[in-house]
Image: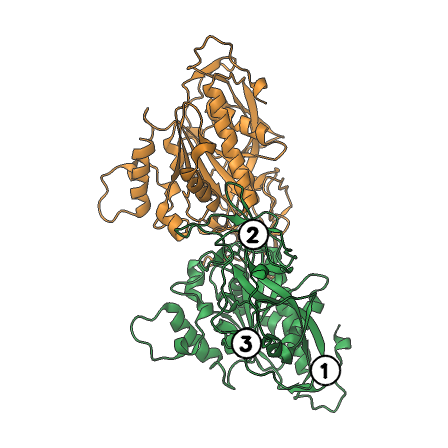
Chain colours: A orange, B green
Amino acid sequence: MGDYDNSTMRIRGKKPTGTQMVRADKVRMRWSRGVKTRRGHHGMKKGGAGVDLRHPFDRTAAGPPLAVNMAASSTLSAIHKVAIFGGTHGNELSGVLLVKHWLKHGGEITKPGMEVRPFIANPKAVEKCVRYIDTDLNRVFDSESLSNDRTGKIPYEITQAQKINSLFGPKGSKDAYDVILDLHNTTAHMGATLILENSRDNFTIQMCNYIQKSMAPEHCPVLLIEHPGVKYTTTRSIAKHSIGIEVGPQPQGVIRADILHKMRKVVKYALDFMNHFNEGTAFPSCSIEVYSVLEKIDYPRNNIGDLSAIIHPSLQDQDWKPLNPGDPMFISLDGKVTCYEGENTVYPTFVNEAAYYEKTQAFAKTEKVTLSAQSIQSVTLGSGEPPASLSTVF
Amino acid sequence: MGDYDNSTMRIRGKKPTGTQMVRADKVRMRWSRGVKTRRGHHGMKKGGAGVDLRHPFDRTAAGPPLAVNMAASSTLSAIHKVAIFGGTHGNELSGVLLVKHWLKHGGEITKPGMEVRPFIANPKAVEKCVRYIDTDLNRVFDSESLSNDRTGKIPYEITQAQKINSLFGPKGSKDAYDVILDLHNTTAHMGATLILENSRDNFTIQMCNYIQKSMAPEHCPVLLIEHPGVKYTTTRSIAKHSIGIEVGPQPQGVIRADILHKMRKVVKYALDFMNHFNEGTAFPSCSIEVYSVLEKIDYPRNNIGDLSAIIHPSLQDQDWKPLNPGDPMFISLDGKVTCYEGENTVYPTFVNEAAYYEKTQAFAKTEKVTLSAQSIQSVTLGSGEPPASLSTVF
């Protein structure tokens, strides 16, 4: 897995009282509130466990909020070009097997009027069944890496990123693919998680809403990794809209039928949504609850960087469950417990993800936020027939 | 994980009816029975899934059974030198963390009259958090690899094996360590498994019996990987007695507190057993049920070796549970199910172990066998006091 650790951040001094209500177009406004340092909110009992990992981009520097009339509809272009990426990380096997299957048997992902292209994003890493060869592919879609003016030995993943950008981008251009679904696995007990990078993307929020409703009663949480001032450098960030589909728990290098089945269902519902949209279905305005990343928390470590404690059994496998002040987070091998000393309940995720040990992250703290999206409808509707409404979809 | 795939084998034509009763000293006699090919016993419905992986060493070529009087006691030397290996595979973290802990805080593993030495077996692999650097350390303790007359570039693990052999062996000599406990993790749902290499080793069978009773009611299965005619080439095979301690499920590169706790308990009971033995406790003859490896089963694969099916959900996480004729084993991505077509119930283990994809193994089939061991007592008892009996231990 691994889709957001570059963009984790911390809202200091906030005191959420229950779920935060945020309109998609107002997220920056919320972040532009004054911040105040309060150790108790994110502090740890033991040194080393709570690391201030505030991003150098201060939220207060975010741009002004967009002035969008929430009552209005967004009329958007139809979706023509969709890519499904597997193997962005070569040892996350659900996406690898699904994409390989769809490359031979594409009927399942065929939709009228859409090119849906399955693609193995990091074939050398897939061949070796490792996360990456030289560097993490999912962190190198920045303008510097994507430019061709590098000199010296170029890491394999940079070359591959440039190739992907030419096939599915260029990033930020009108020629870029409309949607990329990027398939990941995690060793954490996160279930079928949708990772959202842009809280103001009405289309993608509507897609998340559709997938969540379709997956119900199964929990299908949305993780918001947005950070104002940071351009996302994930593989899928080259598309106009994107979702990371992160399903776990599954060990690296292992393929489990139950996890594959969940991922497959999410992709099916995502494509169904795009198909309904293209057919002219009007999706009324909606709100979804998302988990917004606050801060990443490292393991307690000794002076040479080795772990000095591990995830406490009461936190293990408890992704998305409340972590309340006083709850245990870590336990050392001689039995010392490190508890959460913040003032507010938070919601951990990516708890004990294998790929994040090297990224000094034991879990990420999130808070619940409600995002709203405008109603949307495709501009290609032109048959004169009344559009289907969302109620006919469910 | 990974401790026996070199020594898996197949008894063809056997028709176990319930648990097999085998005396420790009679195992070779059982294996020397005539064998007969019967496809139905191990056949698969789909081609490719059932591979005859009979070991080149035919069981019928095993030597004659030892003539041992089961009523007699074995009087054995006391245990003076014990090693605990962690990191034989560098991404199996329970043993790595426990050994690193005990290297600094050894009180927990200190026993009177015994040197108990914790040791990181493959430090470079531990540093990189990979199974191995050049080759699997747990497969290279054969006489050829351990000899110093190799030329050319020597793989790191061969050099390391020679070092380990000089520190804890030499293998097969009187100077070798008395006991090695080798700590492994698996992604399979095997619980706390004890891996036994020698069905005629009264001391180790007694130790397994003690650990099983101490762990009860938790299931602590014993996996017998013995193969007549094959010298074991595992890391621990240099000791006079050894147990592989294989605990799962745990992803590679992840440390879970619950799995670490189980492994720690097994080590504690193993050391307690040796301590009681050294103090003169008489352990009466006993019998234990073990799972004896029959055959390894590969995934169905296509013509270029890629998986064409994965473990069926009804077999996933079902290690040690009966696999009956007609039960599903694999499912392809287009829904085709491959069932078990053997005539007899078998007991799968190492189901979906990450490290065995490259070793073409989806799981191992085992049968239940009962091993008996003579009573044992230490020769060092010399105080004149009557020995403690096992009943005083539990």
Q: What x and y, as percent, mark residue A132?
A: 38, 49
User: What residue do we see at 48% from left, 28% from top?
Assistant: A271
**Which chain's residue wears label 1?**
B
**Residue B259 sits above or below residue A341 on the image:** below
Element marked by disc 2: loop
User: Which mark is nearer the camera, 2 or 1?
Assistant: 1
Same chain? Circles 2 and 1: no
Tell whether label 3 touches label 2 (CB within 8 Å): no
**Which chain's residue wears label 2?**
A
Q: CA distance from mark 2 to mark 1?
A: 48 Å
In this view, the residue in front, B197 or B45, is B45
Residue tagged 3: B60
Please state which amino acid type lies under the numbered disc 3.
Answer: Thr
Place residue A342 in its image quadrant: top right
Q: Tell me if mark 2 has few (under 14), some (14-19) or many (20+) residues whose alpha carbon lies within 10 angstroms of its own.
A: some
Residue B282 tag number = 1
User: Which mark is nearer the camera, 2 or 3?
Assistant: 3
Q: Tell me if mark 3 has few (under 14), some (14-19) or many (20+) residues whose alpha carbon lies within 10 angstroms of its own.
A: some
Place residue A89 in its image quadrant: top left
Please state which amino acid type lies under the numbered disc 2.
Answer: Lys
Q: What x and y, as percent, mark residue A145?
A: 30, 40
Residue tagged 2: A46
Please state which amino acid type lies under the numbered disc 1.
Answer: Ala
Asked whether the viewer can see residue A72, the reply is yes
Q: Quadrant of the C terminus of chain B?
A: bottom right
User: Which mark is nearer the camera, 3 or 1?
Assistant: 3
Q: Is B100 positioned to the left or the right of B128 in the image?
A: right
